[in-house]
Image (cartoon, grey):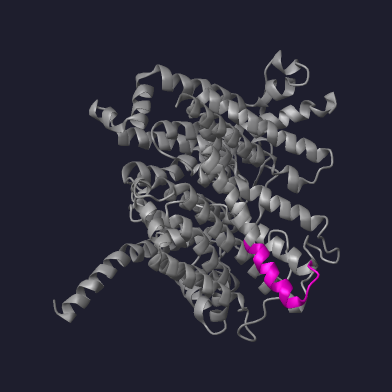
Amino acid sequence: MTVAAELRSQLARHLGQALPVLGAVAVGFAVCGLIALWVGLKPGLMFVELIKGAVEGPQLFETVARAVPLVGMTLAAAIPLRAGIVNLGADGQLALGGCAAAIVALYLPAPDIVRLVAALAAGMAVGAAYAALAAAGEIYAGVPLLLSTWLLTYPAKGLCGFLVRTSLRDPSTAWPSTARIAVGARLGSLIPGSPVNRGFLLVAVVAIAVIFIDRRSSIGFELKLRGLNERFARYGGVDLHRQTLGVMLASGAIAGLIGAIMVLGSQFRYTDGALTAPQYSWSGTLAALLAGGEPVGSVVAAVLFAALQTGGFAMERSVEIPRVLTMVLQSVVILFLAMRGAIWKRP
Amino acid sequence: MTFAFFNATFFDQAVLGITPILLAALAGTLSERVGLFNIALEGEMLVGAFAAIAGSHFGGSLQAGVLAAVVAGALFSGLLAVGSALLRGNDIVIGISLNLLAAGLTSFLLRTLFGVSGTFSDSAMQGLPRLTVPGVASLPLVGSALGHQNVLVYLSWALVAVIAGFLNRTPWGLRLRGIGEQPDAAVALGADATRYRFIVTLVGGALCGLAGLQLSLGSLTLFSENMTAGRGWIAVAAVMLGRARPLYVAAACVLFGLSDALGLRLQGEGLPNQITDSAPYVVTLAALVIAGLRRRRLAGALA
């Protein structure tokens, strides 16, 4: 085969994979346009403002800042998804991780830099441990992860909410939150004058590690094997229980790390509900589903969703269209793909 | 704990807590029996709750609200019916996206149609009227809880019996169960699996619409964003605990309703609500773990 023909067939293959996604995105925009029209808004103007608001000038930095936690939460969803497991409990792991990071950063008697590192580690450890609880439930009692992870989010959020109202409460704030973390123990700014902090680098390292493990290691191979055919994976010698535990530990650790990054890098305190309010875990789950758990595709989808959300804020400000419409858009895209059987076909 | 701890209000709260979960769990039971894993109960319920308020506000009557809730629940579940029953897409992925779509759509419409965010209530709106069952209502302690509730509460109890009877005593119920247990055999014997799955999904949507109606017009008359607060997922857990047998599923729902009321009661005793709000979820998880461990032990004893 000539080089040109080879290139053409490669291109056709990739295009073939991307076409249903592009089609679904078009359907999503069409549905949202119709909904907007129905309630008496102008869809044309809406989409212009949405796109301008995502990439124009300083808005681009907003998008990058939003992409940092979203890419992280997408990876937290993508790792289990690769093996056909769904972790719906990322919100709880995120909240606990952020709360633990705040406690360590505030109260550990150590130099600032040690506190910062320990806070990040604490976030990861607590997130991982909480996710492992769900894994143990499935391994020892057969409680499906889909259900246990979701149900576990409520006690987690409740516990954090309780702590910031009682022993951790900073009485000088109106909303229940902890005291402010000292400047030295924060994740500093990466690009001066922008909302992008050094958490960007941490998430980049995590993303590269996940991509590398997925593509080049036996761990990644066994994950994909299970995702394609669980019985075959077991027959091939994959220890499914061990894998479930490992997957949940990794997923929970990343979610906890993102909680820590949000607290140490942009909010500087744990405030009740502030970590889960932007719904990064849901957008992350959808982005990971869009790419079928494949890490590079997941990261790309997460960045696109981050742009969509930033654009949504701008759209709400300039033309007063509720930004929650972007959530409708995201879910319609996945819904359409899932209905067509384009993601996660039935065995 | 004194006797007064479990007062009439406690049982009243429990029955109110049980009803939406029970209606949704019956929908989940039917789905499970026909071989579909329906995790969109939460979203269907939320759509129903919103439609009930929108219907009664714009339609100007309670009847319009009831109709809107049932129709909206069924229509919304139509997306699951088409995607899962007809096109055989992955029901988990469809369920997850439907739940998010419901949350996004109701929040969006709340802002655009009613111009508010958070909560909408309208003092002119009527809630479901309470019905008094003579005799039962005058029982001590549980009288009000069992004999003085709205129509929907009694309907949900009747539906447990109706669905149990339908599944176990009618030819359609037999075919439905057959499709869930051995689809190939059922189809070979002439049952139309797609049609059964389609209809069951739509009926389930209507039931979830009623569950939502109970939330928004049952005892209060308001809609607030994400007011289902995980009840759809608790219903999924109830279906699993009751192994999709209506009476057992109903028993599981009673357990969760009681824990919900217990949480509220403890809150009244001064426990912080961030902790007591977790009660139904923790009880659900504990029940799933205990049932799972028991099943494992029995399976181990047989082996």
Q: Is residue B204 left or right of residue A182?
A: left
Work out whether residue B150 or residue A2 is closer to the camera in this orientation and state it.
A2
Task: Kindly give the residue lying farthest to the top in the view shown.
Answer: B135
Whether residue A175 is situated above or below residue B259 in the rendered picture: below
Work out whether residue A187 or residue B100 is closer to the camera in this orientation and state it.
A187
Question: What residue is rendered at 70% in x and 73% in y?
Answer: A116
Whether residue A202 is situated above or below residue A342 in the rendered picture: below
The secondary structure making up most of the magenta span is: helix
Question: What residue is rendered at 42% in x and 37% in y?
Answer: B202
Question: What residue is rendered at 53% in x and 54% in y?
Answer: A248
Magenta segment: does it hold B236?
A: no
x and y, in percent, of residue A131 in the image: 58, 53
Q: In this view, does B34 lie to the left or right of B262?
A: left
Whether residue A126 is situated above or below residue B246 in the rendered picture: below
Task: Kindly give the residue lying farthest to the bottom in the view shown.
Answer: A192
Residue A277 visible at all: no
Magenta segment: does it hold A115?
A: yes
Toward which corner of the image does residue B166 lie, by quadrant? Answer: top left
Q: Give the range drawn in magenta.
A: A108-124
Work out whether residue A28 or residue A245 is closer to the camera in this orientation and state it.
A245
Residue A261 visible at all: yes
x and y, in percent, of residue B200 in the image: 40, 33
Instruction: Tell me the quarter of the image containing the N terminus of chain A.
Output: bottom left
x and y, in percent, of residue A103 in the image: 75, 63
Toward which corner of the image does residue A106 lie, by quadrant? Answer: bottom right
Numbered marks: total: 0
x and y, in percent, of residue A63 in the image: 54, 75
